[in-house]
Image: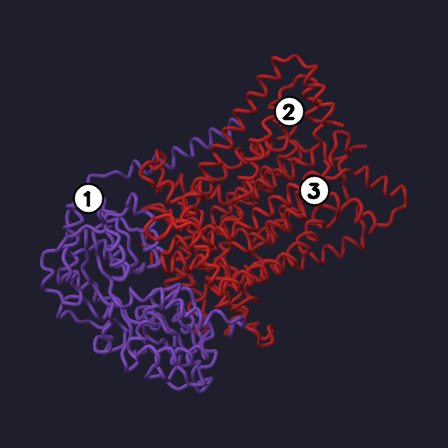
Chain colours: A red, B purple
Amino acid sequence: MSAVLQSSEDVLLPTRRVVTEQRVVAILVGLLCLALLVAIALPLWALLSKSFLNANGEFVGLANFARYFATPALVQSLINSVMVAGLATCIVVPLAFIYAYALTRSCIPAKGLFYALALLPIFAPSLLPALSFIYIFGNQGFLKDLLFGATIYGPIGIVMAQVFYCLPHATMILVAALALSDGRLYEAAAALGTTRWRVFLTVTLPGARYGVVSAAVVVFTLVVTDFGIPKVIGGQFAVLATDAYKQVVGQQNFSMGAVVGMVLLVPAVLAFFVEQILKRRQVALLSARAVPYSPRPERRRDTALLMFCVLVGGLVAGILGVAVWASFIKYWPYNLSLTLSNYDFAEFEPDGWQPYFNSLKMAALTALIGTPVIFLGAYLIEKVRSAVLGRFFAHFLAMLPMAVPGLVLGLGYVFFFNAPWNPLGALYGTIAVLALNSLAHFYTVAHITAVTALKQIDGEFESVSASLKVPFWTTLRRVTVPICMPSLLDIAVYLFVNAMTTVSAVIFLYGPGTKLASIAVVHMDEAGAIAAAAAMATCIVVTAIAVKLLHLLLDALLLSRLQRWRVRTG
Amino acid sequence: MRRWLLAAGAAIALAFGTGAAEAQQRTRVTIYTALENEQLAPFKQAIEAAVPGVEVVWVRDSTGVITARVIAERENPRADMIMGLAASSLLMFEGMNLLEPYTPAGVDALKPAFRDSTPPATWTGMDAYLGVICFNTTEARRFNAPTPTTWQDLTKPEFRGRLVMPHPASSGTGYLMVAMWLQQMGEEAGWRFMDALHENMAVYTHSGSAPCVQAARGERVAGISLDMRGARERTQGAPIEVIIPAEGTGWDMEATSIVRGTRNLEAARRIADWVATRQANELYSRFYAVVAYPGVTNTPTNYPANAEARMFPNNFTWMAENRERILAEWSRRYESKAAPRN
């Protein structure tokens, strides 16, 4: 219906403005595609194309694949990966859904605090939960009896650490999905005397369907591609990502590493098409006539949800707290006296505190460039009608990085940006290329967040603007950006925090003088200075939390200024 | 939006500005290294004192990561030199024609095993590192595990599920040990020994130093790991003994090379000269028991005595040539079965 209206409007409108606006769209979409090609597709291809070459760079067709699939251990890794990822997804998504539901659809107190608690894990390098779980459940752990003799080194440890690590990603997407909804639907349901359970099944759940599937897809691929956790706590439970590590770092066999990288891309490509199918069914929830839903207090529901949030948030904080505590310990487990000496990084790390400041600079750069680019990109993909092919292509590229293990993306950057013919070679080894790499690495979740937020705004805003002869950029600036400001801030914080903590992609890319704090954590851990590693990780966590607090403050300010429409007055 | 862009522009300028400001009169020599963190500062100081006009810039990472990185950058090398990297990695680079031939002045004074004997010489040995057993005496008492003195001792039932070693496909140290057992015992007996060892193994780690860290922290009773780490964990207060079994142990050496295509060839050559000096070797011996220069001996604190006598005569060429075959067999025996142990 609206598509028909739209095309008839196109015909009726004076042609000149339409043409220029379309041209602007075409140029912008073109630029977006180019940027995504340079940041994501070309580096990836630079590495993945090696899966068809032998060690001497000669083309061997599918021989590497044949050899890889002939290895019996592969099938096991594949099964292990899918099993662990499936299990983690089944645990995380319901947890995150209830949590996000409590944050958006109930009247529990201290929502900001609970949201921040759920986001805590992304403030920490993934090494940190693995360290914590070893301190808690390892053979010397103080709660190891809770495992009833089972070992933390293996699938149990991986799933536990992954649940912790993925919770914020899922929560973020689901909060975006549940945040906006049309209050009129609930009023209608209430007026008809519909039971709460039925309202949940027929209004809430369908409305959040896109978010739930996105969250599941994100968690699944995150678990499949992460190698940090299985490396530290997985024992000999082989998964695909550690297979890639074994090939590349253990045996310097890039061809086979690329083969594993290709196998890892399969879930992402599948996920992309699932998402495309789903997208067609999703209807915008927030039509132009919508009234934002605001929950009313309800004692029993609120108490139950509050207890749930206290439990989950408390566990998250506790796990992180163990690592912070460990950073003050002299020598676990034989000398538990407390000390500040682990924070004297010059003792453990030749560059002292420098990596920390490098990380700050890099993370700020990632957030400052990434947020406008990602949001504008999502807007073009979601809200603009022309340049169909370009938009589809851009969306596909945007969904790709999530499926790529950092190791693969990082090596791809080495091959692409260090190639003698590449004019961008000057960037190699600089903070800028590290920022670009982090942006590419974390593009997908930020993109999904932006798209999810945008999907909930009715396309009628654009239609009305078009019929009022207002160009789309004015609508974007005056309507869309202000409505989406909370999501924009979320994206900025997400990028900043992930850039602070990322390891696997940048470990091949840092140059002299651009070592990052997260890499220093890995190095100190490898050197056996576990407490110092925990200390540096604690600095990262504290910084990220400070940024988050700033975010909350800004959010509060914005909410009072730009988001006044959300509050119903009379 | 405009303010965002301005801020972003400022941030970019900041990122580049600092890079430009660092340009100095001295020649910056970028050295890729797998030396331990704590060694970097004294090494830098010593090199800059010995070779005036040179500024050393390190890029440090684990052996596997540095090796992968050098190969990944082969089209356009970024390092001027490689220092303190396993000789097996440097041999691989030599085969790829990535190293600049150079024979440092005074290299003839070094022990023969630490010299590149096949001309043109591309690497200079510095020190040797050994595989050792880190044995946690506190935990051993709890489980009545006897102090191992031979490799076979590790197959005793007291160690079941309490042993840890590096995965040979992930870690150079792991492969070093597997290759050593096969050479020392012969293939058939070597595999039989590893079958028995596998019964006791809790986990194969992805890093060569992790097993000793795990043993030091009482996660395991014994870990097969790197010598350096054992000595240091003990110095830090871990209740471990660092043991080299009587039959001898696997080792590799750390060596230095100049990267082909460096823009600072002259400075790199002078640093390579320094690497072969007695003075430099005295620095190495602060950290390693076995160094290239004859007569320089110093056993670092808590380092096992008799290390040099117990170095198994490793055949590096055999190790390199049989790697793929051995790893495939290893994987077939110990990885393909479903049930993860421990």
The answer to whether residue B245 is above or below residue A320 is below
The answer to whether residue B40 is above or below residue B151 is above
Kindly indicate the quadrant of the structure image that contains residue A304. Answer: bottom right
According to the picture, the residue beneath numbered tag 2 turns out to be A475
Q: Residue at x 61, y 41 (%)?
A: A449
Q: Amino acid at mark 2?
A: Thr
| Neighbour tally class for label 3: few under 14, some 14-19, many 20 plus, Cα within 10 Å | some
Whether residue A335 is visible to the viewer of this picture, yes or no, is: yes
According to the picture, the residue beneath numbered tag 3 turns out to be A179
Image quarter of the C terminus of chain A: top right
Q: Which residue is at the front of the view, A250 or A490?
A: A250
The answer to whether residue A509 is above or below residue B181 is above
Left or right of A202 on screen, residue A508: left
According to the picture, the residue beneath numbered tag 1 turns out to be B264
| Neighbour tally class for label 1: few under 14, some 14-19, many 20 plus, Cα within 10 Å | some
Q: SS of the residue at dot 1?
A: loop
Left or right of A309 on screen, residue B206: left
Q: Residue at x 43, y 42 (%)?
A: A43
| Chain identity of mark 2 | A
Q: Amino acid at mark 3?
A: Ala
